[in-house]
Amino acid sequence: MGKLSRFGVAMDEDLLDRFDRLVERRGTHANRSEAVRDLVRDALVESEWEDSDEEIVGTVTMVFDHHASDLSERLDSLQHAHHDKIVSSMHIHLDAHNCLEVLVVRGTSAQVRAIADGLLGTKGVKHGKLVLTTTGQHL
C-alpha cells in the first residue's frame, strides 16, 4: 500500500447519517475512511470487469425447482458446454423441490457474463445472481 492522502467530502447530512449507520453495522474495525476505500475499490474492480480482456472470476448462484420439466438436464448441458470455464460447482438440496447451485466461473468478462446469462436466463430458474471479483492486483 502506498502513502495515504487525505481529502474532504461534502455530503448531505441525511446521506452521511445513513452512511455512518452502514459503517457501524460493519463492526468495530470499520470507520468512514475504510468504508470509503472499500467503495472505491469496489468501483475500480467493477470498472475492470466491464469490457476487459483480463481474466476475472465469479460465482453464479441460482435456485431452481429440480422437478421443473427437464430443467436439471438443460442446466447440466449448459455447464458441460462451458466445462473449460467452470472451475467448480456445488449443488445443495434445500427442500423436497428446491435446489441451490453455486458455480465458480473463470474467463474474460464477456465469457463469464455469457455463461451466467445463459444459466440464469434458463426457464425455471427462480432466482440467481452473478458476483464477480478479481485478485485485486491492480488496486
Image (cartoon, grey):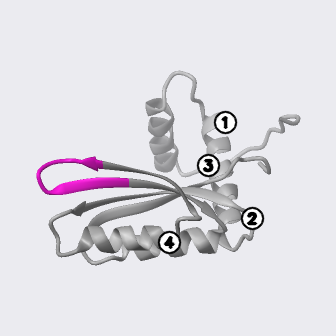
Query: For numbered disc 3, what is the local secondary structure?
Result: helix
Vertical comparison of 94 with 119: above or below: above
Indicate yes or no whether the magenta region holds residue 104. Answer: no
Q: CA distance from mark 4 to mark 3?
A: 27 Å
Vertical comparison of 36 with 111: above or below: above
Query: Which numbered disc, 4 or 3, marks the residue that appears first in the sequence?
Result: 3
Residue at 72% x, 70% y is 52
Type of residue at label 4? Ile
Residue position marked by numbered label 2 in the rendering: 54
Residue position marked by numbered label 4 in the rendering: 115
Q: Is residue 73 left or right of residue 43?
A: left
Q: CA distance from mark 4 to mark 1?
A: 36 Å
Which circle, 2 or 1, is nearer the viewer? 2
Q: CA distance from mark 1 to mark 3?
A: 10 Å
Type of residue at label 3? Leu
Residue at 62% x, 48% y is 39
x and y, in percent, of residue 127 in the image: 30, 64
Q: CA distance from mark 2 to mark 3?
A: 22 Å
Residue position marked by numbered label 3 in the rendering: 39
Query: Which numbered disc, 4 or 1, marks the residue that appears first in the sequence?
Result: 1
Query: For numbered disc 4, what is the local secondary structure?
Result: helix
Vertical comparison of 17 with 27: above or below: below
Query: Which numbered disc, 2 or 1, marks the residue that appears first in the sequence?
Result: 1
Residue position marked by numbered label 1 in the rendering: 33
Indicate yes or no whether the magenta region holds residue 96. Answer: yes
**Stretch in magenta:** 92-101
